Image (cartoon, rainbow, N blue to C red):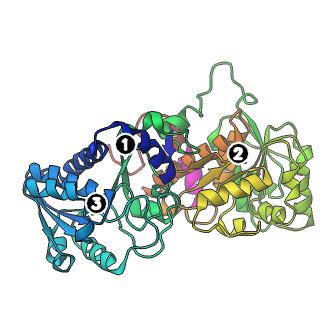
Amino acid sequence: MIGLHTADEVRAAEAPLLAALPDGALMQRAATGLATVCLRLLGRPYGARVALLVGAGGNGGDALHAGALLAGRGARVTAVLLSPERAHAPGLAALRRAGGRTVAPDDAGPLLDRADLVLDGIVGIGGSGGLRPSAAALVERAAGGPALMVAVDVPSGVDADTGAVEGAAFPATHTVTFGAVKPGLVVGAGRAHAGEVHLVDIGLGEHLRPARAWQLTDADVAGRLPVPEAGDDKYSQGVVGVVAGSATYPGAGVLCTGAALRTRPGLVRYAGTAAEGVRAAWPEAIVTEGRPSDAGRVQAWVVGPGTGTDDDARGVLAEVLATDLPVLVDADALTLLAREPDLVRQRAAATVLTPHDREFARFGAEVGEDRIGAARRLAADLGAVVLLKGEATVVADPRGTAFVNATGTPWLATAGTGDVLSGITGALLATDLPAAEAAAVAAHVHGRAGQLAAAEGPLIAGDLVRHLPAAIDRVRGGRPVRLPDSGP
């Protein structure tokens, strides 16, 4: 797993190193790692035009020292000094010794128009708010050119802890971050500004406190999706009950049931009011036309997608939540639960709520800019796991542990994809996985299925169900997935 660490946690880990190492040694480590990534991105550094946008303080020093190393490899490096009197003096001296030059902001336009790579050393992890107008104008000019846009540690204008962007910010194609990945690089608006994130080890490992937020990798997810063994049967693989869909929205039941079936080779029991459609689409499911209590033995429940919000739907939700089984609550059931949150507060068994931003707000507060913080607060208030859907889905448990999903595609923003996610999560809840991990694994697999489906063109929710086996195989590191139109 990739630990996500706040700016304060990184500063605390740096402190003993700064006290023990010679002056400037930690910055040199960071600058060397930064320059190494830039050299790899440039391919042939000799003669490459590199522009440094240099603010005051350590972030500008990182850029200047990296620029000196690039100049030593034959790059034509020019620093644009936004605050000449406050520029990092040792870094500026190193750049000049290596043959680099400086230019005033007013004269930087032609340089930025022709640059092959622009390094953002304007502000670091301590920055807040958007860029000042003068810096914003330079960034806009650079973004309009052909250059690779490379942020130093965190794109300037992005909050390192939350990903909030209040005004102008540096639109990086790559971010080289030091010591630990910051949450603001992978969540909120910061995710879009960070581009591809490259982590440089500067020796903080033993000094970092244990992370409270994580990203799962494919390998992490594969370890939580074991392959069936010879002694397994349909019951040992997990039995999930699904209450989804209605006469008005039968597709929700079809999608949710299909996703559960495609995630695990166990057993799915359907107990909703779209029985005819589910039976026709998925003869593998056991369909019960009655109350959830009539469905038979299950090990987890999914309730809510497309069920409506009438008295009957409220009664079914209360019945399911009264069990001692893990329950996933989605869509219409979230609307009902927001009216009676004590239905989940009083539960001893695990509950997973899967709101998008508007559903989240029904529980009394807007999500706001800090998506991880918002998910943690609602999870603690209700004593439930919260899966907050978004471009980077956030999962938080009542103790404050959080996961930020790293997979997905904007093409997932279409009707029915949330029903698929509910089915995947429900299937995993029916295994021995802790609820927060089940939700995080489900989000990861859902995102991988979306990426595979989007490779074929605009997707619909049913495409995700079809691609789930291939997505799971990809996560497990199986043979490369061959799409239907990929050729021999």
Question: What's the CA distance linking mark 1 and mark 2?
Answer: 32 Å
**Residue 60 - label:** 3
Label 1 element class: helix
Number of residues whose C-alpha sits closer than 10 Å to that of mark 2, classed few (under 14), some (14–19) or many (20 or more): some
Residue type pointed to by label 1: Leu
Tell me if 324 is positioned left or right of 132 in this view: right
Question: What's the CA distance linking mark 3 and mark 1?
Answer: 18 Å
The mark that comes first in sequence, 3 or 2, is 3
Tell me if 25 is positioned left or right of 183 in this view: left
Residue indicated by mark 1? 18
- Seen at 52% across and 63% down, the residue is 188
Q: Are marks 3 and 1 in contact (CB under 8 Å)?
A: no
Residue indicated by mark 2? 399
Residue type pointed to by label 3: Gly
Residue type pointed to by label 2: Arg
Label 2 element class: loop
Question: What's the CA distance linking mark 3 and mark 2?
Answer: 38 Å
